Image (tube, coloured by chain):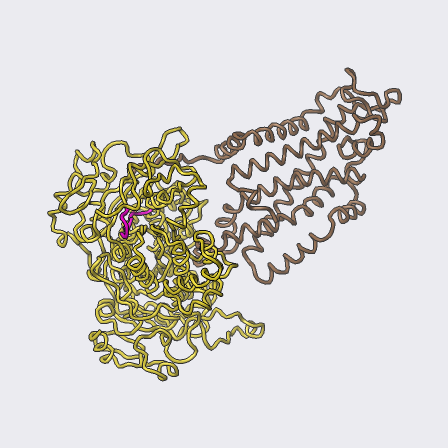
Amino acid sequence: MKNAVQKINNLTIGFQSQKGEQISILKNISTSINQGETVGIVGESGSGKSTLALAMMGYVKQGLFTISGECMFHSNNLLEMSNKELENIRGRKIAMIPQNAGQSLTPNLKIGYQIDEALRLHTDLKQSERDEKISELLNKVRLPSPETMAQRYPHELSGGQQQRVAVAMALAGSPELLLLDEPTTGLDVTTQAHVLELLNLIAKDTGTSMVYVSHDLGAIAQVSDRVIVMYSGEIVLDGPVRSILKNPIHPYTFGLLKSIPKLTSPGLPNSMSGSQPQPGSIKNGCSFYERCEFADDNCKANSPILEFIENLNTSVRCFKHNELLNLNKSDSQYVKSIKNKILKNEILDLSNVSISYAKQKFLEQLLNKINDDNPTVKDININIDKGETLALVGESGSGKSTILKSIAGLLKTKDGNIKFDKDKILSNDLRQRDSTFLRAIQLIFQNPDESLNPNHTVEEIISQPLRLYFGLKGQDLKEKIIEVLDKVRLGEFYLTRYPRQLSGGEKQRVAVARAFAAKPDIILCDEVTSALDVSVQAAVLNLLQELKEDFGTTYIFVSHDLAVVRAISDRVAVLYQGRLCEIGPSKNVYKFPSHPYTEVLLGAVLEPDPDIKPKLVAEDIVEEKPPENGCSFQGRCPRILGDICKNEVPPWQTCENGNSIRCHIKMDDLKSQQISN
Amino acid sequence: MIIKYEKQKNTFQKIYEVIKTMASKPSGLIGLIILSFHVLLAITSPLYVPYDYKAIDPTLMLNPPSSEFWFGTDSLGRDVFTRTILGGRTALTVTFFGSLIALLWGGSLGIFCGLVGGKIDDIVMRIIDAFLSIPWILAMLLIVSLLGTTTLVLIPALGFFYGKGIVRVARAATHDVIAKDFIVSARARGHSNLSIIWNEILPNVRDAIMVEGAMRWSWMLLGFSSLSFLGFGVSPPTPDWGLMISNARGLMSFAYWAVLAPIFGLSSLIIGINLTADAFAKALGIDRSTKAPV
């Protein structure tokens, strides 16, 4: 048995409701973190994972208080210590890395100064020793040229670099325990893979224990030795990463894993019904009862306890774990393949579209022209057939949302035009567009909290397009709203509710309903699932697919999540710096990633399986602007040929299975290079 | 899943809810009591004043408070108590309608500028800035001396000068909302600007503008009383606090009561409105300690 760094015994944290009841957010948590171990804590939003991580630092959020239990760091109970005593532990013994490094670094202080501050607080080093230590720390987190880096301000670094600085600051006090709260959630796929690799290296080098809190099972699988699954404030599963992700013996984990789209198994994943119970709403029985496919009457009446299973080295809170253990998991991995009726009938045609964010000069405004040789988006040629789902993928800054906006008329194009239904050119100016075109193209946004007016009821929200496009009123309007709501599986009683009274999934359904109320031909989906929990994400994807099959709507689906795109799209267009790199049928793009950028992107995808490691083939550099000449990917390309890539725009090559790529390297050469790696 | 939903309320229930929340804190309760007392007094006082407010009696000049004249008498022998309880009527009416006008034009222009942005916004805001740099009381004096001191001049003039600040608040609140996706969504659907303002923006900025308006009311009251004090507000013999203070201040050393009574009336009303406005803001979820008006 290894030494436990931290031991949590029967910890219950809760708040007092207005009626004076004590409601627990965390219920009877007992676990321990061993030396040198990386523990992943996973759960959906509201499961109490962040509250637990904060309690591990001896911090309880305002409004919450410890009802019972203790949080032992060596032999001290952190929850009973005074602030003065905690100061000596925080940073020196236990350090935390926050979710958004960009916001947690002070913008007007240099990186070096901020690390120096941490060193001054948490170590007894002298000035000259500290300077050396800063370089050492920056080296440790693999930041290039530490001396110049220390002189920079946070805004001069990319997101991944900022996160590395946050790691360096946390390491300054050489802590025994490192708490990470969703440290890679806001980062691009390739950057995320690099940061996770760094964390693995640091864990190995320093022997620091780590607690990694995340909703992303893919990231958890890459870094953790042990995984704790939380649901509704309880630990439901606690054991070695392989046993938990490969053969989960708790129905919640099982369902969660099923609802994640994977690159290895295309098609739409299963969704889990329902959502997490509100704190305090469950008095008796298992908290997962409502959503469990294995539950029986016993589960409703009695609460299961956390049971330790010797031969799996796993603790589980379920009566039915034996049933799950012997279940053949691969059979039940049910995925629905998508069948879209695609008519060979062009509905949208982007030809030579370029979009520039450059500010127009006065003369240019008069002539209604933009002079920008290096626009954000350039030379986009895509034809979209009626009924298909086209996905635009790429990292942040690849111009995918920009293209969506200009299709919707929210951004003017610089050159080229967008044709609707073969020959009708869509005007650049939203106000000059015909209302039938406006109706035909609808948008669904990433975050339903922002896209639904908080002061409107569901009825008012959905009535907007109906009144505008069809002029419906009174009883007709109400009937139509109910009909639309019914299509997205929301009942009539939702009519009078405000968005704040709905769960995340329900809100996104309302947003979908609003888009479909206009009877559109094309729906533009802008990262529609990235603000949602995985189980909800699967439900929304399934809903979108069903509606599409019913109405024959065309989707243009923008996402950074390649697994989601794999699940829902017929065709994929890969973008880098506003230029198309590759376009082709999904199954071919994912099977033979021929463009070097596609290869890099797919290599960095994290699967929820500890045995599938990401392949890191390129540096995670972030480029501010597209290069002026040559190939857009020249700065990061692992297979760069030389001057030709820097000076000449690569030609399109089409291979027999329908993929087109834009690269100087011959397709066959690329394929053989990728296989030999 | 069990979520207890709040029952949907109609407008009256919502107003009742807001007032209940306001009254739940001592400061809000005190503010509400003071304000309603003043409003009640202003409405009903003509029914029960003990004396005629304009009855001059040289034999009763500057009598100290007594059982007969509760607050004493002034230099013309008029009853100070009668004049004090009548003195808030004009001020309250003028400033109430003045703030309504300020709210209307300031709010609409602010929302419009926030939504449209660009050149129009720049030009309008610079004009507003220019007006903000002129001491309002000088401009007011000019207007009043040209057009006279009737309420029909005072209400729009005060409304104009106190609406400038509301333009800025409304514009800032609109800017907060305008970046949200539901506005983008409405634009992409092709709604007109007017429909976007009415349906999408107004419900989200209404609260901020209303609180600002309530705050302006108390400032305007002070401004109006200053005008009366300078002799440009209410004309004598109509009782008015500002005017009463102005008339009695020379005799303050030996007839303190004639000054003290109107001062008490004015300051208690302003405190009442301020406390109520603060409680109103808190009840609507706007924290004025972090979001200061521009």
A14 versus A229 height, above or below: above
Relative to the observer, which residue lies in front, A465 or A511?
A: A511
Q: In the rendered view, does A303 fall on the left or right side of A159?
A: left
Chain identifier, yellow in the render: A
Q: Can residue A415 be seen in this view?
A: yes
Q: In the rendered view, does A331 fall on the left or right side of A453?
A: left
User: Where does residue A565 sit, x and y in percent of width and height?
Assistant: 28, 62
Q: Which residue is drawn at 20% across and 52% down?
A: A245
User: Where does residue A367 sit, x and y in percent of width and height?
Assistant: 54, 75
Chain identifier, brown in the render: B
A39 part of magenta stretch: yes
Relative to the observer, which residue lies in front, A604 or A404?
A: A604
A503 part of magenta stretch: no
Identity of the residue furthest to the top in this view: B67
A645 versus A606 height, above or below: below
User: Where does residue B247 sit, x and y in percent of width and height?
Assistant: 82, 32
Instruction: Tell me which segment is drawn in magenta.
Output: A33-45
Please tell me in which quadrant of the rendered image residue B9 appears.
top left
